[in-house]
Amino acid sequence: MNTQVVTIARTWLGTPYGHQASVKGVSCDCLGLLRGIWRTLYGIEPEPIPAYTRDWSEPQGVERLMIAAHRHFLDARDTPLAAGQVVLFRMRQGAVAKHLGVISEVGTMPQFIHAYQGHGVVESPLSAPWQKRIAARFEFIERDD
């Protein structure tokens, strides 16, 4: 499953960034990338995504992405970092977690795939500053349906 997640994520590389979008090769944001991977793996998305602003739930301080991730993914906090895991980042200390990516490589040069404003979908080094921002890690659930 993890290798499959990375393979799917890499097909999105080069997709331009677009807030609230989720169309491979056309436009997506970080949540849109995860939604696209989900659709490839399972078909229909698990729940409708309401419109959201660029500041997500910062003014209210509600961890909307974290709560949703716990509903639909397996918590991977007690497992080693692995390719295919979903990472949820806090962009600032004390802020809500609001950026997502997929681990694509582990080891001495870990990397992750994410949709980044101004860059589109890219594969980036999981550098020390990025690692410090990780708020949670999750795994896609194996399904037989």
Image: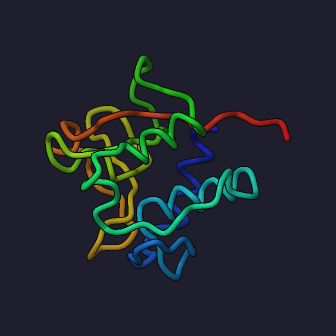
* Above/below status of 32 relative to 143: below
Residue farthest to the bottom? 26
Residue 104 seen:
no
The percent position of residue 9, horizontal first and vertical second, equals 52, 57
* In front of the other: 10 or 71: 71
The percent position of residue 126, horizontal first and vertical second, equals 26, 45
Q: How many marks?
A: 0
* Above/below status of 15 relative to 91: below
* Above/below status of 18 relative to 2: below
* In front of the other: 105 or 137: 137
Kindly identify the residue that appears in the image at 27 percent across and 40 percent down.
Answer: 109
The percent position of residue 41, horizontal first and vertical second, equals 70, 51
* In front of the other: 135 or 41: 135
* In front of the other: 70 or 58: 58
What sort of colour scheme is used for the picture?
Answer: rainbow
Q: Name the image quarter holding residue 57.
A: bottom left
Kindly identify the residue that appears in the image at 50 percent across and 74 percent down.
Answer: 21
Residue farthest to the front? 60
The answer to whether 143 appears left or right of 116 in the picture is: right
Rendered-image quadrant of the N terminus = top right
Residue farthest to the right? 145
Q: Name the image quarter holding residue 95.
A: top left
Residue 20 seen:
yes
Kindly identify the residue that appears in the image at 52 percent across and 55 percent down.
Answer: 34
The percent position of residue 22, horizontal first and vertical second, equals 54, 71
Rendered-image quadrant of the C terminus = top right
The answer to whether 67 appears left or right of 132 in the picture is: right
Kindly identify the residue that appears in the image at 83 percent across and 36 percent down.
Answer: 144
The answer to whether 67 appears left or right of 41 in the picture is: left
